[in-house]
Amino acid sequence: MVEVFKTDVDQVEQARRLVNLLMRHFPGSKVNFDLDDCDKILRVEGINFKAEKIVVLVKEKGFECKVLE
């Protein structure tokens, strides 16, 4: 399963911290950001994650996050 999210993360260090957080919650998943994209894309690939939980975790850290349709 692959899910793509639009975020407002704009700094590499912020992205790194969020990747580490998400990897702890969803071990075995691939998590990365494309900060060069206008939508500051967060991409998660794996089998045991819920998009809603990712949105909640990212928002708890103070960033906007929504599933990209």
Image (cartoon, rainbow, N blue to C red):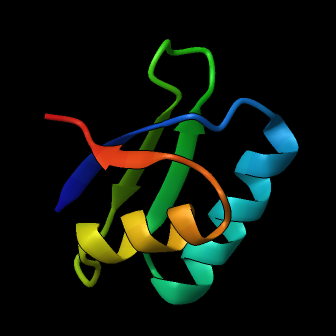
If the image is split into quadrants, where does the C terminus sit?
top left
For residue 44, what is the image quadrant? bottom left
Q: Is residue 10 above or below residue 59?
A: above
Which residue is located at x 59 percent, y 71 percent?
60
Residue 24 in the image: x percent, y percent? 61, 86
Quadrant where the image shows the N terminus? bottom left
Residue at 56%, 73% in the rendered image: 22
Horizontal side, residue 49 vs residue 25: left or right: left
* 36 to the left or right of 1: right
Residue 13 at x, y percent in the picture: 86, 46
Q: Nearer the viewer, residue 24 or 9?
A: 9
**Horizontal and vertical percent for residue 49?**
29, 79
The quarter of the picture where residue 23 lies is bottom right
- Residue at point 26%, 71% (across, down): 52
How many discs mark residues in the rendered view?
0
Residue 45 to residue 26: above or below? above
Q: Position of residue 59 (x, y in %)?
A: 53, 62
Q: Is residue 8 above or below residue 63?
A: above
Q: Compared to 15, does 39 lie above or below?
A: above
Q: Residue at x 79, y 49 (%)?
A: 14
Q: Is residue 8 left or right of residue 44?
A: right
